[in-house]
């Protein structure tokens, strides 16, 4: 009984995420089909990965025929933040929650689902997570399918405008925290400056976009960790 | 030429392990303050590096992209939702391209 209630609450709470994902994954679907993926491949990628940043960054590598090792390393670094989130979520689960449930919850650790799960009062019920995940992933995969499908018949003007959707979402994730913390603001500004230098400077611009992100992330995040270590509360709030 | 399905499989396995291992293995708190701090800053560095300068070429016209970027920054600073920021920045690009 409690299970069903929690599950329904999860489904309901995830409706805004589902809508947001529909819009962003629609843009992803369009870009995936432009990168040469079929509708089926794009949809499978969304179902198997459920990671906006990871999937968008992968398209570039796939386009440029990158190596499997390169794509593995890129996903590791781009998605490393999920490690922190999963770690925080593990504290939120009762020790009675078994390994199978934990493996299922792990499938849906995204920025937005994590945000809802971690701010839930008391212990996290696995059924609540399943509700969140099913509703959100439905939007993510449906949007990808529609985008990849419609991308072939949509006017170029609209495709061009939708190109900004994913970056708008990224900005909406990082800027509010940059407003609260000077260290986060410095990380954001430095990462953007380094990334720009790596994109246009001679020699450095030969580095693929995947490794560019990896190098900039590691250098900037490590420097910030040394210069401005965070205390425990800040980490669990992230 | 590499196989797209193997790309997808490699991505899925790496991404899933990143999410699954801490949830199943780490049952106690991480001790190293450096590691904790590093992990805390990673999302901001990654997303910022992915956003700029790539956003400038995300649409067909760099002027539209700059306008969309500026509006997104303002809206995000005012703590608007993900959906609002993403949608409005797209609309701005569309409008700029329409008038130019």
Image (tube, coloured by chain):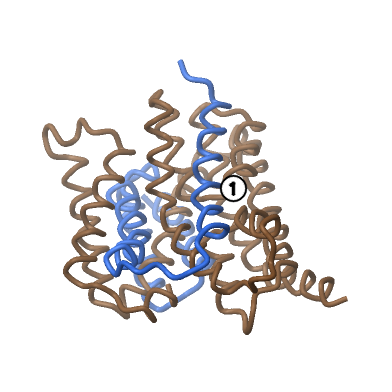
Residue nearest the viewer, comparing B63 with A148: A148
Residue A35 position within the rendered picture, expressed as x and y whole percent measured from the top left:
48, 30
**What residue is rendered at 52% in x and 66% in y?**
B27
**What residue is rendered at 39% in x and 25% in y?**
A67
Residue B45 position within the rendered picture, expressed as x and y whole percent measured from the top left:
30, 58
Residue nearest the viewer, comparing B78 with A141: A141
Residue nearest the viewer, comparing A134 with A165: A134
Q: Circle 1 — which element?
A: helix
Residue B54 position within the rendered picture, expressed as x and y whole percent measured from the top left:
32, 46
Residue B2 lies, with reference to residue A76, above or below; the image says above
Q: Chain of mark 1?
A: A
**Residue highlighted by disc 1:** A26
**What residue is rendered at 46% in x and 53% in y?**
A166
* Quarter of the picture holding the N terminus of chain B: top left
Residue A196 position within the rendered picture, expressed as x and y whole percent measured from the top left:
20, 48
Q: Colour of chain B?
A: blue
**What residue is rendered at 34% in x and 50% in y?**
B50
Asked if residue A2 lies left or right of residue A47, the reply is right
């Amino acid at each position: 009984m409690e299970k069903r209630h929690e599950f329904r609450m999860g489904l309901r709470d995830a409706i805004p995420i589902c809508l947001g994902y529909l819009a962003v994954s629609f843009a992803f679907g369009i870009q995936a089909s432009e990168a040469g993926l079929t509708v089926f491949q794009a949809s499978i990628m969304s179902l198997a990965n459920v990671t906006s940043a990871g999937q968008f960054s992968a398209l570039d590598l796939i386009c440029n025929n990158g190596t499997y090792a390169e794509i593995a390393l890129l996903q590791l670094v781009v998605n490393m933040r999920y490690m922190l989130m999963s770690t925080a979520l593990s504290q939120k689960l009762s020790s009675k929650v078994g390994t199978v449930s934990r493996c299922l919850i792990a499938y849906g650790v995204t920025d937005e689902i994590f945000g809802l799960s971690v701010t839930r009062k008391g212990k996290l019920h696995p059924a609540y997570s399943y509700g969140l995940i099913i509703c959100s992933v439905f939007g993510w995969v449906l949007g990808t399918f529609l985008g990849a499908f419609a991308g072939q018949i949509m006017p170029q003007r609209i495709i061009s405008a939708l190109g900004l959707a994913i970056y708008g979402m990224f900005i909406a994730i990082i800027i509010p925290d940059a407003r609260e913390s000077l260290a986060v603001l410095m990380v954001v500004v430095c990462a953007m400056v380094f990334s720009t230098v790596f994109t246009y400077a001679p020699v450095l611009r030969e580095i693929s976009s995947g490794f560019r992100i990896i190098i900039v992330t590691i250098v900037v995040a490590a420097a910030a960790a040394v210069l401005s270590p965070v205390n425990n509360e800040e980490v669990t709030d992230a | 030429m590499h196989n797209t399905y193997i790309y997808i499989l490699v991505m899925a396995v790496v991404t899933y392990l990143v999410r699954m291992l801490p949830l199943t293995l780490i049952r106690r708190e991480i001790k190293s303050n450096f590691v904790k701090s590093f992990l805390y800053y990673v999302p901001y560095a990654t997303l910022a590096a992915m956003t700029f300068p790539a956003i400038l070429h995300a649409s067909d016209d760099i002027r539209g992209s700059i306008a969309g970027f500026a509006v997104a920054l303002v809206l995000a600073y005012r703590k608007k939702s993900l959906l609002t920021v993403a949608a409005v920045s797209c609309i701005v690009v569309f409008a700029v391209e329409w008038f130019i």
